[in-house]
């Protein structure tokens, strides 16, 4: 008798990990040498006084995706993730944008032909 098999559906989840402080020069150097931050799933975005990682992870659930992303920081000394944020783009990409949460952005209009 064959045992039942279940296939767990995964999907891609989008979110941001906001750091408590901008990366120092030493932390930036460490980041450059960490292969797990260079596989296309997590990308550093910085502006003066602010650092965050834009994330795109495959998982069964959003919390599973966030947990996997946070696990990447275990060996990244002195870096503290302050919050997980879902901006309007992430809410839309995750299929969570509703008028009660945040309205979906208007569709882009086609450029007129020249």
Image (cartoon, rainbow, N blue to C red):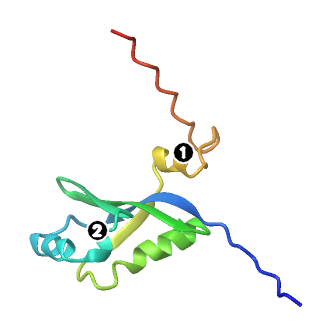
Dot 1 or dot 2: first in sequence order is: 2
- Quadrant location of the C terminus in the rendered image: top left
Find residue 43 and name its label: none
At mark 2, the secondary structure is loop
Residue 63 horizontal/vertical position (percent): 56, 70
- Foreground label between 1 and 2: 2
| Residue at 63% across, 37% down | 99
Tell me: 97 left or right of 52: right
Check the image and name the residue furthest to the top. 114
Viewer-proximal residue, 8 or 60? Answer: 8
Tell me: 91 left or right of 84: right
Residue carrying label 2: 38
Residue carrying label 1: 92
Residue 80 horizontal/vertical position (percent): 31, 75
| Residue at 45% across, 19% down | 110
Tell me: 68 left or right of 35: right
Check the image and name the residue furthest to the bottom. 1
Residue 83 horizontal/vertical position (percent): 41, 65
Q: Image height check: is 59 above or below 96?
A: below
**What is the distance, in whole Å, between disc 1 and disc 2 at their CAs?**
25 Å
Residue 9, quarter of the rendered image: bottom right
At mark 1, the secondary structure is helix
Residue 109 horizontal/vertical position (percent): 46, 20
Check the image and name the residue furthest to the front. 1
Viewer-proximal residue, 59 or 89? Answer: 59
């Amino acid at each position: 008798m064959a045992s039942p098999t279940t296939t767990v559906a995964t999907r891609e989840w989008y979110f941001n990990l906001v750091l408590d402080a901008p990366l120092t020069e030493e932390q930036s150097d460490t980041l450059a040498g960490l292969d797990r931050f260079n596989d296309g799933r997590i990308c550093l975005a910085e502006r003066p006084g602010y650092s965050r990682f834009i994330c795109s992870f495959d998982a069964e659930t959003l919390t599973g995706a966030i947990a996997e992303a946070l696990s990447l920081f275990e060996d990244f000394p002195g870096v503290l993730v302050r919050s997980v944020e879902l901006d309007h783009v992430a809410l839309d990409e995750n299929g969570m944008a509703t008028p009660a949460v945040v309205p979906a952005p208007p569709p882009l209009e086609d450029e007129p032909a020249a």
